[in-house]
Amino acid sequence: MPRVVVDVMPKPEILDPQGKAVLGALPRLGLTGISDVRQGKRFELEVAEVTDELLAEIEKIADTFLANTVIENYVVRVEQ
Amino acid sequence: MKVGVVTFPGTLDDVDAARAVRLGGNDAIPLWHGDHDLKGVDAVVLPGGFSYGDYLRCGAISRFSPVMAEVIEAAQKGMPVLGICNGFQILVESHLLPGGLLRNDHLKFVCRDQKLRIENASTPWTSAYAQGQEIVVPLKNGEGQYVADAETIARLEGEGRVVARYLEVNPNGSINDIAGICNERGNVVGLMPHPEHGVEELTGSGTDGLGFFSSLVEQAFA
């Protein structure tokens, strides 16, 4: 069954306190050389069939509901 | 005036908000998130809490509840709406107010008596205060950091739409120490601190918060 994935990330200009906290923990775990961490969300939508119509609807839902476009960007893509 | 107080699943402060509405001289009418009408109220308070468990984003699911369809329509027609804390988050998710609310910059939940300055005393929710009046009310939030792009901030500041500003301590990293804002018309106000917890001497930090709930009465009889 195909899957539509919606990735939601905080906009680059928006401070991401959670990503910053994760970044701060990395050296304590022995991982160095990481300069930045951004934390986002991934939505997996299982669909029977991928159609242009359905993708358009998912795009709309991503834009109005799954992401808050004031503070977040999103990408919709199909995963087979 | 009849003031509706909305309860969503996960709302915490609806009882305190209703009590504050009554102490302010108005009638509190309980509204439920599944209601399809506003029961003839003249104004609405969206109280604080963790509606829908803060799932997805704070306020994101509440914004699509049946009662919010009614609140959004009424607000656009000029009905006074006050969103406190989670209510403020619901108002920005509803696009009734610009900007967004992020996790506090220091990542910790904050709970304190917070000093504020009332920057706009001409909204239906703040007219009981003097312009520039300093008050202390409880503040408690995990995601209270107000953000917006530079253009929006400049507009809010230029049009006098910053309703309240944090004094002495910025508890959550909000841009320009913004604690509350209003829409262009001034009828929709979002506020991160909790005036409804500051309405009686017995509890809380005093009675400085009462003005948010008595302003409607002053206006009705003005």
Image: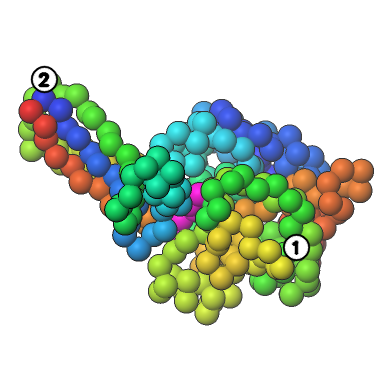
Q: Is residue A39 above or below residue A70?
A: above
B105 magenta-colored: no
Task: Report the residue that reaches farthest toward the bottom.
Answer: B158
SS type, badge 1:
strand
B101 magenta-colored: yes
Task: Report the residue that reaches farthest toward the right.
Answer: B202
Q: Residues within 10 Å of mark 2 (few under 14, many from 20)?
A: few
SS type, badge 2:
loop
Please determine if labels 2 and 1 lie on a single subunit.
Answer: no
Task: Name the spot of residue B100 as percent of width and height, x first.
Answer: 46, 55
Residue type (three-letter) at the residue carrying disc 1: Lys
Write the residue at 41% across / 37% down.
B56
Q: Residues within 10 Å of mark 1 (few under 14, many from 20)?
A: some
The chain under label 1 reads B
Q: Is residue A10 above or below residue A57?
A: below
For the residues labelled 2 and 1, the Cα–Cα distance comes to 56 Å
Q: Which of these two is toward me, B19 or B140?
A: B140
Task: Name the spot of residue A37 as percent of width and height, x first.
Answer: 34, 50
Which residue carries the number 1 mark? B115
Which residue carries the number 2 mark? A1
Q: Which corner quadrant holds the C terminus of chain B?
A: bottom right
Tell me the magenta residue range. Answer: B99-103
Q: Answer yes or no: do the residues labelled 2 and 1 have beta carbons within 8 Å?
A: no
Quadrant in which residue A71 is drawn = bottom left
Task: Name the spot of residue A11 as percent of width and height, x first.
Answer: 32, 57
Write the residue at 67% across / 53% down.
B193
